[in-house]
Image (cartoon, helix red, strand yellow):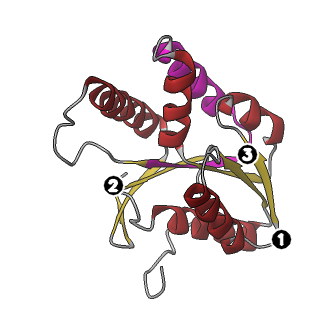
Amino acid sequence: MAGNDTSFGPLPRLTFVLGGARSGKSSFAQTLAEQAAETAGHKLFYIATAEIRDAEMADRVAAHQRARGPEWHAREAPRDLGAALRAVDAPGHVLLVDCLTLWLSNVMEAESGSGLAARFDALLADLAALSGRAILVSNEVGLGIVPDNALARAFRDQAGRLNQQVAAQADQVFFVAAGLPLKMK
């Protein structure tokens, strides 16, 4: 994010950051959180949704961990994101959730895709009830070709639905491409 203006003012209650793979969305979200901590004294919490299933994912997780300083408190929430949010939420806290698409993938795999509407509603209710601030990161997966199999199409469709619902509830929304944030809302 070097050289980019990331001074977007005080961090509102709910910020949503979208982008493609390797777009810089996670780095941008981390910068927003750290700026809020620096300027307003907020305590930082990183809520990770990834599950480490192979060496490549372990390397990705390690790189994310190295990018965060000791001021970050980490919590894992591969499926029960609402419980993790409720557990660390408090006034003066910034919760960075990275990322919603990994959470969705984990939930779809565990639950065979059933009950997603209820899971989305529960997450939105948890977000509405937060007393601290939250930044949610998600992949925009609808900009490419239509997948050639039913599971991939179902995932793309559900991710699009989830992103729309979170964006509607968010106070501000950014789209990040090639490391450059565009404020959408």
Where 2 falls versus 90 (above or below)? below
Q: Disc 1 marks which residue?
A: 70
Question: How far apart are the alpha carbons under marks 1 and 2?
Answer: 31 Å
Taking the image as shown, residue 4 lies to the left or right of residue 145, namely right
Q: Which mark is residue 132?
A: 3
Magenta-span inclusion, residue 125 = yes
Residue at 30% across, 29% down:
157
Residue at 46% across, 47% down:
138
Residue type for callout 3: Gly
Image quadrant where residue 32 sits: bottom right
Image quadrant where residue 30 sits: bottom right
Taking the image as shown, residue 108 lies to the left or right of residue 64, namely left
Q: Disc 2 marks which residue?
A: 184
Tell me where residue 12 appears, x and y as whole percent.
58, 52
Question: How far apart are the alpha carbons under marks 2 and 3?
Answer: 22 Å
5 and 60: which is toward the camera? 60
Residue type for callout 2: Met
78 and 122: which is toward the camera? 78
Marks 1 and 2, the one that precedes in the sequence:
1
Q: Are marks 3 and 1 in contact (CB under 8 Å)?
A: no
Where 134 falls versus 60 (above or below)? above
146 and 26: which is toward the camera? 146
For marks 3 and 1, give the one nearer the viewer: 1
Tell me where residue 94 appears, x and y as whole percent.
71, 54
> Element type at marker 2?
loop
> Element type at marker 3?
loop
Span highlighted in magenta in the image: 116-138
Marks 3 and 1, the one that precedes in the sequence:
1
